[in-house]
Image: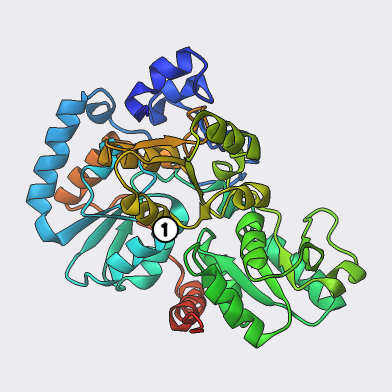
Amino acid sequence: MPSVRELIRLAAKDEACGSDLAQDPWALNQNSSYGPGASIADPFPEHAPHQSALPERYTQASPEELDAMITAAKETLGERVKILGHFYQRDEVVTYADFVGDSFNLAKAAKAHPEADAFVFCGVHFMAETADILSGADQAVILPNLAAGCSMADMATLAQVERAWADITAAIEAPVPVTYMNSAANIKAFCGRNGGIVCTSSNATTVLEWAFEQGQRVLFLPDQHLGRNTAHAMGIPDEEIVLWNSRKGLTPEELERARVIVWDGFCSVHKRFTVAQIERARAEFPGVRVIVHPECPAPVVQAADAAGSTELIRREVAASRPGDVLAIGTEINLVNRLAAQYPDRTIFCLDPVVCPCSTMYRIHPAYLAWTLESLVAGEIPNRIMVDDAVAADARVALERMLAAHPKVA
């Protein structure tokens, strides 16, 4: 499996989803698109955060020089600063992380370390927001590159959701709003204000069970596929799952029959996986075990042997045996890391084209070195701060999630 460092060679041979993957993040126009990778064609927000230019000290540095900068800064900062690295980050960044995990577990890691002055979140914007909400008021959460957004989170803006809410509640009794962790803080706050809750890919079923105890319908934001797949797993038929179209809305008849209204958002990485890829893997490797993320389209989840969060995928791989063959439908960096961790197994990504998460790709060791050296100098760059009122409402939705427990049969 190729590493990010091999993308130049792959892009040149048309084995990657864009030749721009060969460029460093600061060489790209960060105000016109999400950049190379899976989200490059997604609609780009007009007022997306802009990352200021990095000094040449960092952009011209070799990998060895950046390593020396980061290592020295980490040693100087000690326990005062913790680096949080998401599973989907490139290896060149994850190697420096004090904690590696999914977005919510990293936010909980921030909450669990009150002794730290700052957290450097190597992930994307909504993740840093959640860490800021859950960490102490005197702790700084920093995103090394402000251009590291999330196209899925950007597919549900507060203005869009409030317009949809007005249309929906004019036709039927208000549904219970449920938002995926992969959403902006103000969407989490919207759910908190309106009797709703947050979910992760690990606990979506538990959260929907809680939601149906509160009301007869759910509005699921912003990922249509996680919402649909979770509803299917609960036995809800397709005719009772309706897709909210932000341009046309839904008719009163469609809303009346719905139990789950799913927003029309998606993850561009997981949307790339197909049933044809699964069929090809099974043809080439009889006995292969196919594991996919529930952000994949429903037909892909139904054709797989297992579907679940990044943590479930990791557990499934850990539980496999030497000689096993596993085809995985999730972000390439995690798949590559698992393949390296278990060399006695055949582990590969279902998608043969290397197409990493566009926004995770924005975090580069140069940005990490700049961030850490700024902290050593007494500066706090790129601090992510959620408005107090928004944070209070979002915290309500997060705390409801933490209080929801799976039903015991």
Q: Is residue 292 left or right of residue 242?
A: left
Q: Depth check: give the residue in front, 318 or 153.
A: 318
How was the colour assigned to the protein in this rendering? rainbow
Task: Specify the farthest residue to the top.
Answer: 13
Q: Which residue is mark 1?
A: 312
Kind of residue sitting beneath label 1:
Leu
Identify the residue at image location x=27%, y=44%: 94
Residue 120 spot, x, y in % from top left: 28, 53
Identify the residue at image location x=40%, y=70%: 133
The answer, for residue 229, to whether it is visible in the render is: yes
Q: Depth check: give the residue in front, 167 or 234.
A: 234
Q: Is residue 177 left or right of residue 237?
A: left
Identify the residue at image location x=18%, y=43%: 373
The quadrant in which residue 189 appears is bottom right
The number of numbered discs placed on residues in the rendered structure image is: 1
Residue 58 spot, x, y in % from top left: 25, 30
Residue 196 spot, x, y in % from top left: 60, 78
Q: Does residue 392 sit above or below 84 in this rendering? A: below
Task: Specify the farthest residue to the front.
Answer: 286
The answer, for residue 102, to whether it is visible in the render is: no
Residue 364 spot, x, y in % from top left: 32, 36
Q: Does residue 292 sit above or below 13 in this rendering? A: below
| Quadrant where the image shows the N terminus | top left
Label 1 sits on a secondary structure element that is helix
